[in-house]
Image (cartoon, rainbow, N blue to C red):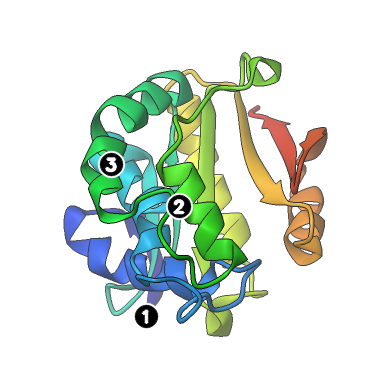
Amino acid sequence: MIKIRNAILGDIPYLYDICARTALDGEDSRGSMSDDNKVGHYFAAPYLHFDLASCFILTINDIAVGYLLGTTDTSNYTQWLNNEWLKQIRPLYSRGSNAESEFDAFLNTVINSNAENDPRLDGFDAHFHIDILKPYQNIGWGKKLIEAFMGHCKQQKVNKLYLMVSSSHLKALSFYKHVGFRELFKVEGAIAIGIDIK
């Protein structure tokens, strides 16, 4: 049976796997990194450790096949990521270490740099990452995960959320536009999109 539930810390190994299988604009990134866990160290696991209540899992027989991992407090998340989480991850991946690919080099850079909150996103307190394994895409579960997160945001009195999407991931951009997101601004390689929570 397929369903959505709140995340638990026991989901983390499955989320690393899903993250690696979908990290390259929805395609499998395994083999393009010096460590297949590297992308999950940045884009998956920290959300569960910082804001578990804001993370939702798509499951079959209670095993994760997709997720929406987010926070309703981006400002404090960024501070915690820099001051706590990344300090534990950086010893594994030096900025100048040999990279297996352009994507691997990008991960080395973001892990070894402090995250910053863009002032253009002031008021957009929530953000998320969402990934679903291919067999479970295009059948409505992505929209349902976003609806679950938006309902949670509303309970937390958060009325705007955003996410960054690769500018080359046209399928994702089309999906987000379909569910109501609007373009906020562009940066190198990515587009910031946002939505008001009603």
Residue 159 seen: yes
* Residue to which mark 1 is pinned: 1
Upstream in sequence: badge 1 or badge 2:
1
Badges 1 and 3: C-beta atoms under 8 Å apart? no
Indicate the secondary structure of the residue bearing disc 1.
loop
Which residue type carries mark 1? Met
Q: Is residue 174 above or below residue 61?
A: above
Q: Is residue 179 above or below residue 64?
A: above
Instruction: Choose mark 1 or mark 3, whichever is in front.
Output: 3
Relative to 18, is 132 on the left or the right? right
* Residue to which mark 2 is pinned: 108
Residue appearing at x 38%, y 20% in the figure? 76
Q: Position of residue 54 (x, y in %)?
A: 37, 39
Which residue type carries mark 3? Leu
Residue appearing at x 78%, y 53% in the figure? 167
Q: Position of residue 68 (x, y in %)?
A: 47, 53
As measured in the structure, the alpha-carbon distance from the residue carrying label 2 to the one carrying label 3 is 25 Å
Badges 2 and 3: C-beta atoms under 8 Å apart? no
Q: Position of residue 105 (x, y in %)?
A: 53, 58
Q: How many marks?
A: 3
Q: Tell me the tag on residue 179.
A: none
User: Which quarter of the image is occupied by the C terminus?
Assistant: top right
Which residue type carries mark 2? Asn
* Residue to which mark 3 is pinned: 52
Q: Residues within 10 Å of mark 2 (few under 14, many from 20)?
A: many
As measured in the structure, the alpha-carbon distance from the residue carrying label 1 to the one carrying label 3 is 23 Å
Upstream in sequence: badge 2 or badge 3:
3
